[in-house]
Amino acid sequence: MLPQRAIVHVTLLVTSLLAFAPLLAAQSTIPTDGVTQETLRLTRLYGVIADNSMDPLDPDRAIFDGAIRGMLAALDPFSSFFDPDQFEQLKQFTQGKTRGFGSVLYVQPGKILVLQTAEGSPSRRAGLGPGDEIVSLNGKRTDGLDLQSLVDLLQRARSQAARLGVIRPGSVVAQDFELHPAEIPTPSVDKVFLLKPGFAYVHLNSFDIKTPQEVSEAIQNLGGTGLQGLLLDLRDNRGGVVDSAVALASLFLKPDLLVYTQRGRSVPEKSFRTSVGPVHFDFPLVVLVNGATASAAEVFAAALQEHDRALIAGEPTYGKGVVESVTPLSGNTGLALTTAQYFTPCGRSIQRPMPGTALENPDKGLAPSRDPALAFKTDSGRAVVAGGGITPDVMLPSVTRDPWVTFLNQSGLFTTFASQYLTLHGKITESFEPDAQVLAQFREYLEQGRVRVPDEYWGPDQDYLKLRIKVELFDLVFGLAVGDEVEARGDPQVQSASTLFPEIPLLLKPAAASAPSLKQKGK
């Protein structure tokens, strides 16, 4: 295996070495270092394959998709090579934007429904809104296409002007729309509302360069420093720009507090601390996490936990604590290479062990030497769990749904029923609540579609069925933001986490024992 520092060298020089390999082989002064020898071995292997393979060899595919991706895969799951399209998408993600029409769509075989259009987007300016059904795209009808064909059609349409045939709710005649793609902001804050007077809820789906500003603005709109508490939901947040995690922590922590330390074999150790910003929030804070909370989101959660600033609730996080250094390469390609690790303020490694990879023993040689008998502790002396990921202060197990409900969710039957319900009954009001009659209509709809309704699930699932029907109806009538609020309010983990605010002073006190005492609620 090549040393990590050699990979960029190989990437940049392999093409030229292919051209000059015969010349190099003829010289007697070829360098004997490992990098050169392994590179020459690669060029010789390429020559054998190029001369003897059944089909002509595509150099770009063989080198970029084969050799380089193979080398990176042998290191760890996070190092990767980006082709031009992937590298452009990566740059757009870190900037919090993408290119397209600014619509959130529900896509099922033969059916495309608009769930939301972004403010100022081509879709919003054209007048598209929740519940609109796209029945044709660039002259091609959608009702006869399978799911993959629809997805491919939508992907191709994002890069050029598109002609849409759209049926509005309550109408049977399609209207024509022409949309031109544009750069669309993709906010990292996607759910914002008041749980009750004085207590706010914010869901953060990623970390990009605009995240701290978005969170600050969301809090200000809900009450700012006058709030009595904030539930910050980081579930399913897979991270992003770690600098944004430091800036976001600065909104809640005092200045000059350590957020994380970065250590690597070939990079200098560096510490990152909070700074003084234009606004600071002191209200109580609950941070909700789960097994899909990763990377920058874990860095942020760990800093707030170890400085006793927030109560971490939910389930143990993913455990991705490595730094990918992104290097632009020729041809608008790029390379993400694992070069260092994140360590929390008290010295914990966030990275979980990954057997069979270079991260099998992630903090070996990187973590400062310490007495293994000593527990990791917060500023106030509370013991916290080490070994990868962040273990919550309060465990809130997620709800496991039965297989029948899982099937209904995956098949999109709630959305198609909601669309049919609105066609038959017209628009609903915001006071609408699904009742026994609506459930009876849903059951009839399933049976007409030859979907089995097991009695052992139908009864226990009544409340959840009502919630899902309400969410889909509100998505189509009032937009995704309103539907998301309905769904979040009905989420058992959110409901349990929202009751923790009065307990924060007690739960963040130093534990009497050396090992952490985890509370568990909501089971």
Image (cartoon, rainbow, N blue to C red):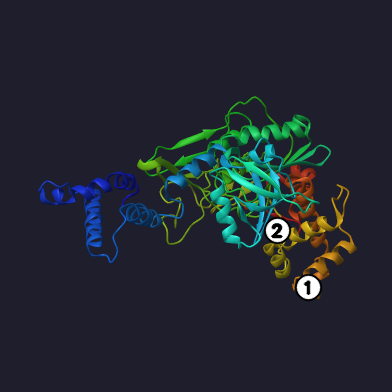
The reply to whether residue 253 is in sight is no
Between marks 2 and 1 in the image, the one whose residue lies nearer the viewer: 1
Locate the N terminus by quadrant: bottom left
Q: Which residue is nearer to you in this view: 213 or 46?
A: 46
Q: Quadrant of residue 106?
A: bottom right
Locate the C terminus by quadrant: bottom right
Badge number at residue 152? none
Disc 1 packing (10 Å; few <14; some 14–19; many ≥20): few
Q: Amino acid at mark 2?
A: Pro
Q: Which residue is mark 1?
A: 453
The reply to whether residue 420 is in sight is yes
Q: CA distance from mark 2 to mark 1?
A: 27 Å
Q: Which residue is mark 2?
A: 397
Q: Is residue 368 left or right of residue 384?
A: left
How many numbered marks appear? 2
Q: Amino acid at mark 1?
A: Val
Q: Residue 213's x, y, as percent?
A: 63, 32
